[in-house]
């Protein structure tokens, strides 16, 4: 994906004139998990299925070279990153790990049968999740807690790798949290977005002399 195809002329001219410093976040959700036996897994460390060589080849072609790569500490994000790297000509890459990019900790709900659990819950328009954004799982986190965890992690890495491409292989909840942050939405607004397995979400951070902001390039782009 070329820079010319993802920036409009006004933004491209501003960057060229030195008005902004752009740090590009390429968010990829991990490959599908098939060994969950229909149970809620949250931060349970399950492996994922990386057998679709054609999909990973297409995904690798969408991503930039010479990027910083980061995953959560959970196995499924590391396996997905390694499968992408194996499918493309990226050269030597060091995979960084950041626990703050992990999926929402669903506490005591983890391990419960998903369908049975959802039958006991009051369905609320706009939640699209196990619970409304501010409801905390027993001994776990709420989605709002996840947003509060992800936001400073993104800010920290944006500062550390300013003007770089950052490929973050993470989780559906983590990516929705990043979208809510970029758009200035309340946490429940982030739950309205779909993030499919192996989809790409691109969020560009612009730092200027008078402040900073985000530009959404693509959400849930599926190779």
Image (cartoon, rainbow, N blue to C red):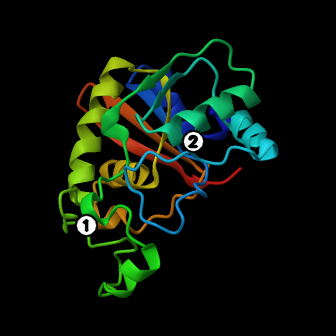
For this rendering, which residue is in front, 207 or 69?
Answer: 69
For this rendering, which residue is in front, 138 or 134?
Answer: 138
Q: Quadrant of residue 124?
A: bottom left
Residue at the image position 41 percent from the left and 27 percent from the top = 97
- Placement of 61 over or under 200, stated as above or below: above
Q: Are marks 1 and 2 in contact (CB under 8 Å)?
A: no
Residue at the image position 35 percent from the left and 84 percent from the top = 125
Q: Residue furthest right?
A: 54
Q: Is residue 64 left or right of residue 115?
A: right
Q: Of the numbered discs in the image, which one, if any, rests on residue 49?
A: none
Give the percent coordinates (x, y) of residue 109: 30, 66
User: Can I make out residue 73 in this image?
Assistant: yes
Q: Of the numbered discs in the image, which one, if any, rests on residue 8?
A: 2
Label 1 CA crowd tier, 10 Å (few <14, some 14–19, many 20+): many
Q: Nearer the viewer, mark 1 or mark 2?
A: 1
Label 2 sits on a secondary structure element that is loop
Label 2 CA crowd tier, 10 Å (few <14, some 14–19, many 20+): few
User: Can I make out residue 26 in this image?
Assistant: no
Residue at the image position 53 percent from the left and 42 percent from the top = 76
Label 1 sits on a secondary structure element that is loop
For this rendering, which residue is in front, 34 or 144?
Answer: 34
Give the percent coordinates (x, y) of residue 74: 44, 39
- Placement of 211 over or under 76, stated as above or below: above
Closer to the chain start, of discs 1 and 2, is 2
Between the residue at mark 1 and the residue at mark 2, the CA separation in whole angstroms equals: 34 Å
Give the percent coordinates (x, y) of residue 145: 21, 53
Give the percent coordinates (x, y) of residue 96: 44, 22
Where, quadrant-wise, is the N terminus in this rendering? top right
- What residue sits right under mark 1 in the picture? 133
Q: Is residue 75 left or right of residue 191?
A: right
């Amino acid at each position: 994906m070329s820079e010319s195809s993802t920036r409009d002329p006004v933004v491209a001219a501003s960057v060229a004139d030195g008005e902004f410093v752009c740090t590009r976040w390429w968010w990829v959700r991990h490959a599908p998990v098939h060994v969950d036996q229909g149970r809620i897994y949250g931060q349970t460390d399950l492996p994922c299925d990386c057998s679709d060589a054609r999909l990973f080849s297409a995904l690798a072609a969408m991503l930039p070279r010479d990027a910083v790569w980061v995953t959560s500490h959970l196995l499924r994000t590391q396996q997905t990153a390694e499968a992408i790297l194996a499918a493309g000509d990226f050269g030597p890459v060091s995979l960084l790990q950041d626990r703050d990019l992990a999926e929402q900790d669903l506490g005591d709900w983890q391990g419960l049968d998903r369908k049975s659990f959802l039958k006991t819950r009051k369905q609320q328009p706009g939640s699209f999740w196990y619970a409304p954004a501010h409801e905390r799982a027993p001994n776990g986190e709420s989605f709002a807690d996840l947003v509060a965890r992800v936001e400073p992690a993104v800010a920290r890495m944006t500062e550390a790798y300013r003007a770089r491409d950052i490929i973050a292989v993470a989780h559906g909840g983590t990516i929705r949290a990043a979208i809510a942050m970029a758009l200035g939405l309340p946490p429940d607004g982030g739950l309205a977005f779909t993030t499919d397995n192996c989809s790409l979400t691109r969020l560009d951070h612009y730092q200027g002399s008078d402040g900073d902001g985000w530009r959404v390039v693509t959400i849930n782009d599926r190779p």
